Image (cartoon, rainbow, N blue to C red):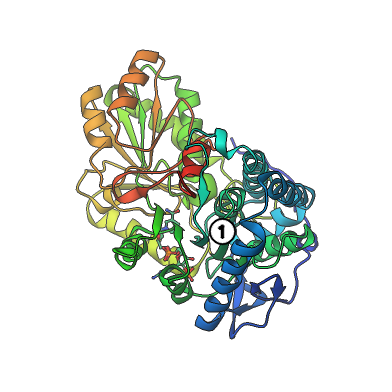
């Protein structure tokens, strides 16, 4: 049964939305060379005008970052760098409510998630790395690890502030400076992060934020003044970047797509597994690189699990992202919605059985109902391609070996989940799975102390933990 709740909307006014935002270069907000509009996907209304960077701005930003690296930030003792990072982390925490509402307006994700996951996890990454800044020689990365120089970072639209923090925190803690290109559809929180850095007194040029389209991302990564590139986004763009960087000697980490298997054995606690499966695919509308988008369920419990799953999904509320009762918010862009619609249609055409949650959808805005495809074969596009939306594909297996073979039958290798009552079975399965992160009896858990990253077409390099620091240092 679905409970009826009165709407509990968070106030949009808390976002302190400005009519216009501008690129941040060398410690100042500058006019940029053009402009774009950023849109609230829940209403399709324009939120703000955003100045965009040009190729010249990329030059200016890299030069400013280089100067800051050579004159202020690079030579600064780690304990001093830490003070700035702690200050930035504290201001992010203090302005958490404003950032959460702004993120929800620009991205479409439920306020519950931006409030409870995105912003606190971004602050946690900043605090964690601030703590490392004066202890790098004890990180087990050599007696005197050295920064690399200017980092070029390009981030996607699914966790805009969190991805900015994942790049900025380790880059700055290790003594590098950074030029950051946020995604075209979600530039606002990265620009507020720049404002926060200025408020914290961060020296000019240490952090530069360049809104713009893919061409600006391409210009940042190709710039000869950039020593290290950190990219999160699609596998296609990751491959292009790898080609651009081949032979340049630049360091590169790539965090790309995924098609994670969530394996449920017949001895699992089914109610908990259902929660984990729902969390795995419907968190953030399924716009999650490590989403558990392929459910592998043991055949003997498939009918029971599917029934439990459908009844749980039926209770998910899809709608106004600012409403604190909302579980599934808006799809970030029209292009992404079209992609989800097309891939779901491919599921129908290839013979999978579609079930759609009967939840009501808002009359306007970009929404897609929670959807489950059963009777999925491994060759189908819904089993192979990253849908990046609230669409789950269900396959069955009979033996642990079959579960592992099916789970590993993907070019990706970012994450996986295992649900079982037996520790030994969980350990055995985890060891067989080709995935950078394996969760047991849980899913989508993130912590700055724990390295995150993939293998195969999900990319390489780790973010978080000691391994994440290593990516920004010369041992
Ligand atoms: P992209 O990989 O195109 O975008 C990620 C970032 O890279 C954005 O800032 C983008 O800018 C920028 N970019 C685009 N082209 C280039 C380039 N040639 N060189 C350098 N930077 C570039 O992902 P999309 O937003 O287009 O999403 C497409 C699909 O990718 C999704 O449907 C999903 O399947 C997958 N994806 C996976 C993510 C993950 O976390 N694994 C995150 C996002 C998407 P701009 O925004 O201006 O295009």
Tell me where residue 142 appears, x and y as whole percent.
47, 37
Which quadrant of the frame does ligand 1 lie within? bottom left
* Residue at the (50%, 61%) spot, across then down: 153
* Residue at the (64%, 55%) spot, across then down: 75
Front residue of 181 and 286: 181
Count of numbered badges drawn on the protein = 1
Q: Tell me if I can see residue 399 in this picture.
A: yes
Q: Tell me if I can see residue 451 in this picture.
A: no
Mark 1 is surrounded, within 10 Å at the Cα level, by few (under 14), some (14 to 19) or many (20 or more) other residues, namely: many
Image-based side of 367 in relation to 97, left or right: left
Q: Secondary structure at mark 1?
A: loop
Front residue of 377 and 286: 286
**Picture layout, residue 238 above or below residue 378:** below
Which corner quadrant of the image does residue 291 belong to? top left
Instruction: Give the residue at mark 1.
Output: 330
Front residue of 276 and 373: 276
Tell me where residue 88 appears, x and y as whole percent.
73, 52
Tell me where residue 17 appears, x and y as whole percent.
75, 68
Image-based side of 228 in relation to 398, left or right: right
Front residue of 446 and 262: 446
Q: Quadrant of the N terminus?
A: top right
Q: Quadrant of the C terminus?
A: top left
Tell me where residue 430 appears, x and y as whole percent.
34, 26
Image-based side of 171 in relation to 269, left or right: right
């Amino acid at each position: 049964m679905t409970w009826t709740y009165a709407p509990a909307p968070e106030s949009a006014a808390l976002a302190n939305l400005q009519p216009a935002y501008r690129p941040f270069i060398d410690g100042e907000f500058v006019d940029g060379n053009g402009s774009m509009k950023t849109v609230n996907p829940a209403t399709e209304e324009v939120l703000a005008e955003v100045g965009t960077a040009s190729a010249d701005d990329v030059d200016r930003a890299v030069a400013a970052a280089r100067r800051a690296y050579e004159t202020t930030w690079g030579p600064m003792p780690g304990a001093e760098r830490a003070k700035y990072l702690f200050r930035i982390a504290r201001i992010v925490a203090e302005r958490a409510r404003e950032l959460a509402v702004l993120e929800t307006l620009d991205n479409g994700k439920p306020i519950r998630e931006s409030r409870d996951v995105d912003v606190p996890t971004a602050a946690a990454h900043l605090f964690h790395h601030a703590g490392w800044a004066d202890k790098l020689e004890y990180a087990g990365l050599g007696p005197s690890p050295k920064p690399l120089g200017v980092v070029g970072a390009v981030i996607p639209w699914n966790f805009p502030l969190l991805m900015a923090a994942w790049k900025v925190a380790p880059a700055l803690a290790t003594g590098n400076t950074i030029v950051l290109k946020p995604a075209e559809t979600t530039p606002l929180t990265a620009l507020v992060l720049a404002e926060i850095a200025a408020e914290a007194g961060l020296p000019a040029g240490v952090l530069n934020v360049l809104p713009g389209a893919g061409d600006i991302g391409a210009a940042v990564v190709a710039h000869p003044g950039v020593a290290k590139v950190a990219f999160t986004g699609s596998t296609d763009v990751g491959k292009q970047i790898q080609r651009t960087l081949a032979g340049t000697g630049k360091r590169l980490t790539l965090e790309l797509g995924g098609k994670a298997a969530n394996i449920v054995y017949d001895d699992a606690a089914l109610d908990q597994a259902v929660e984990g499966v729902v969390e795995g695919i419907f968190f953030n509308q399924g716009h999650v690189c490590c989403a558990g988008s392929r459910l592998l369920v043991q055949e003997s419990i498939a009918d029971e699990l599917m029934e439990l799953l459908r009844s749980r999904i039926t209770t998910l509320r899809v709608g106004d992202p600012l409403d604190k009762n909302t579980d599934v918010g808006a799809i970030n862009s029209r292009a992404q919605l079209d992609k989800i619609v097309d891939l779901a249609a491919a599921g129908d055409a290839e013979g999978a059985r579609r079930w759609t949650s009967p939840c009501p959808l808002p009359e306007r805005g970009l929404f897609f109902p929670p959807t489950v495809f059963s009777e999925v074969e491994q060759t189908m596009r819904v089993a192979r391609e990253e849908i990046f939306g609230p669409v789950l594909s269900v396959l069955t297996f009979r033996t642990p070996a079959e579960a592992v073979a099916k789970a590993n039958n993907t070019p990706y290798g970012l994450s996986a989940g295992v649900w079982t009552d037996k520790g030994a079975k969980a350990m055995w399965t985890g060891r067989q799975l080709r995935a950078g992160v394996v969760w047991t009896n849980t899913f989508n858990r993130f912590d700055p102390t724990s390295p995150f990253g993939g293998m195969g077409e999900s990319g390489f390099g780790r973010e978080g933990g000691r391994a994440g620091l290593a990516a920004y240092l010369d041992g």
